[in-house]
Image (cartoon, grey):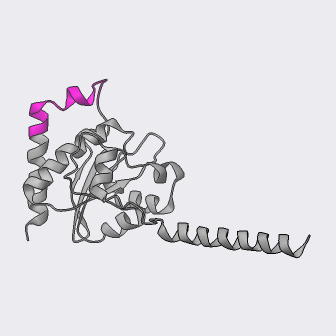
């Protein structure tokens, strides 16, 4: 290869590198940050974007069990969770609750995650024991912890009886009763 050809190739490579730097330098690398309440709204269509849910993983939930927390456990594929979360959110806003931890436990339960198993052990006296003497968390479940003690536990629709749909189950009367129950639970939680 002649010197002229080498210099032309070097010049082209140099220009290509400069163009590459300019392109990379002008790109916007900021990632779109999705806030928890917006993410929750995307996963649960019947819950408004103006919601109080904050995502928590198993370790955060396990730690929360030792202090003060309101924890909603569910997962989007469970159709009952969305209905429950909607009532829970509205009651929380009514009662002035600003944050409810949301734990999507499905993968942890399937994988028998060690921290999930610790959560199960901590809640053992509230969980259903199956015929094979095992316990698990089922959706939807609400746990309210005050000073490391469970002061309220609710899993009313984790085991619906019969073949009733959430639309049929959550009629106006049941929604009103559950809403008032949640408000009462929250008042107990916030009461010094």
The magenta segment: 161-176
Q: Nearer the viewer, residue 146 or 28?
A: 28
Q: Residue at x 30, y 71 (%)?
A: 66
Q: Nearer the viewer, residue 130 or 19?
A: 19
Q: Quadrant of the C terminus?
A: bottom left
User: Could you tell me how many numbered marks the image carries?
Assistant: 0
Q: Residue at x 33, y 52 (%)?
A: 39
Q: Is residue 34 left or right of residue 46?
A: right
Q: Residue at x 44, y 65 (%)?
A: 28
Q: Quadrant of the N terminus?
A: bottom right
Residue 17 among those drawn in magenta: no
Q: Residue furthest right?
A: 1
Coordinates of residue 86 in the picture (x, y in percent): 20, 44
Coordinates of residue 109 in the picture (x, y in percent): 47, 50
Coordinates of residue 146 in the picture (x, y in percent): 20, 67
Instruction: Check the image and report above or below for 31 versus 10.
Output: above
| Residue 61 picture quarter | bottom left
| Residue 2 picture quarter | bottom right
Q: Is residue 56 left or right of residue 192?
A: right
Residue 168 among those drawn in magenta: yes
Q: Residue at x 14, y 48 (%)?
A: 90
Coordinates of residue 186 in the picture (x, y in percent): 12, 58
| Residue 79 picture quarter | top left
Instruction: Check the image and report above or below for 186 versus 44.
Output: below
Q: Is residue 144 left or right of residue 59?
A: left
Q: Residue furthest top?
A: 163
């Amino acid at each position: 290869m002649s010197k002229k050809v080498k210099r032309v190739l070097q010049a082209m490579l140099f220009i290509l590198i400069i163009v590459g730097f300019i392109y990379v330098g002008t790109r916007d690398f900021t990632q779109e940050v999705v806030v928890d309440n917006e993410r929750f709204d995307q996963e649960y269509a019947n819950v408004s974007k103006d919601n109080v849910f904050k995502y928590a993983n198993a370790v955060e939930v396990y730690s929360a069990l030792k202090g003060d927390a309101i924890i909603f456990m569910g997962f989007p594929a469970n159709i009952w969770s969305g209905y429950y979360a909607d009532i829970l959110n509205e009651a929380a806003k009514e009662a002035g609750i600003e944050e409810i931890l949301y734990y999507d436990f499905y993968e942890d339960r399937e994988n028998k995650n060690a921290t999930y198993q610790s959560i199960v052990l901590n809640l053992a006296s509230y969980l259903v024991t199956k015929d094979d003497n095992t316990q698990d968390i089922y959706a939807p479940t609400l746990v309210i912890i005050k000073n490391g003690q469970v002061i309220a536990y609710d899993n009313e629709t984790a085991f619906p009886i019969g073949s009733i749909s959430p639309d049929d189950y959550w009629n106006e009367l049941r929604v009103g009763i559950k809403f008032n129950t949640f408000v009462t639970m929250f008042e107990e939680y916030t009461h010094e």
